[in-house]
Amino acid sequence: MKGYLIDMDGVIYRGSQLIPGAERFIAELKKQDIPFLFLTNNSQRTRRDVATKLKGLGIDVGEEHVFTCAMATARYLARQKPNGTAYVIGEGGLLTALHKNGFSIVDKNPDFVVVGEGRTLTFEMFETALSMIMNGAKLIATNMDPNCPVAGGGTRPGCGAIVSMLEAASGLKAFSVGKPSPIMMRGARKEMGIAAEDTIMIGDTMETDILGGVQVGYKTVLVLSGGTRREDLGKFAYGPDKIVNSLADISHAKLTQEFFPAPVIRTVRRGTNGASPKKLEFAAASGD
C-alpha cells in the first residue's frame, strides 16, 4: 500500500484560496482508500481546526487526516519525560497537543520551554522563558521556519525567528521537532502504517518538505504552486524526484506507475538441445 504526506499552504491552498486541482487529487485518494496525511509546521491550530478550514475550502476530510508539528512535538516530549511540565510560548494547537500527551503547562521550574507560533507574544514571556532556560529547562522548537505567509501575500515572523532570539540570549541551541526533522517525518508515516519505501511526500518548500522526505528515504514531489520556483533548485545539493506545476498535474495512478513500476516476467531459455528447462526471471518494467 502506498501513502502520501501532503503539505498544505502552497500545495492545497494559498491564503484562503484553494489551488485548482487540489480537490480532485484528494478526492481520488479518498475514493481509492489511499492513506494520506496533511503535514503542517503550523502549531497554532489543532488538527480539528485544520480539518475545519480544509472543509471550508471544499476538501472534505476529518481530523484523522491531519498531522501537525505540535502533535509531533508533544509525542516526542512525552517519550522523553512522561507527565512532564512545560512553559509554552504558543497558542491553542500546541497547548492542546501537550495536554493530550500528559504534559502540564506551568509558569515555574518547567522541564521544557516549548516554542511555537503566536500573535500575542510579549517581551515579558521571552524574559520568563530565558530565565527558565538559564536555570536548566530544555529549549524545544516546534519548527524552525523563519517566517509564515499571511493573507494578502505578506509574511510574519515564524517560530524559527522567535526561537533565534532565545538562542542568541541563552547561548544554547533549540531542538526542533517539525519538518524537516526525521522525528516528524517518521511519526507521520507511522501514523499511516506504511513503509518508508511506499511513502510519497508532496510539498512546495525545498528546505522542509523535500529535505525532510529525502532524509528519510521517501519519494518526493515538488509543486511550484507555492514558495519555490524552478530556478531556485540550483541552490540545493538535493532535489525532488519529480517537479510539477501543481496537484492538477498529477494523479495517484500516474505517480505509482512512475515511482513504483510493477515487475514483469520474462521467460529465458537456457541450452539449445532441450537439456535445460525454461527459467522465469523477474525484472522491472523498464527492463533494467
Image (tube, helix red, strand yellow):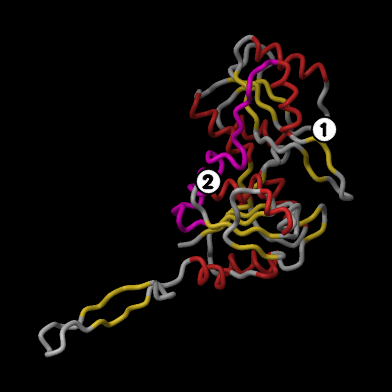
Circle 1: element type? loop
* Magenta-tinted stretch: 170-199
Q: How far from the left and from the top, in percent, is residue 68?
A: 63, 43
Instruction: Say what amino acid the circle numbered 1 marks.
Output: Arg
The CA distance from mark 2 to mark 1 is 32 Å
Q: Nearer the viewer, residue 266 or 6?
A: 266
Residue topped by disc 1: 119
Quadrant of the rendered image containing residue 130: top right
**Residue at 65%, 11% in the rendered image:** 134
Residue topped by disc 2: 215
1 vs 88: above or below: below
Tell me the quarter of the image containing the C terminus: bottom left
Q: How far from the left and from the top, in percent, is residue 45?
A: 72, 41
Q: Nearer the viewer, residue 240 or 123?
A: 240
Neighbor class of circle 1 (other Cα within 10 Å; few <14, some 14-19, many 20+) is few
**Residue at 33%, 78% in the rendered image:** 265
Which of labels 2 and 1 is toward the front?
A: 2
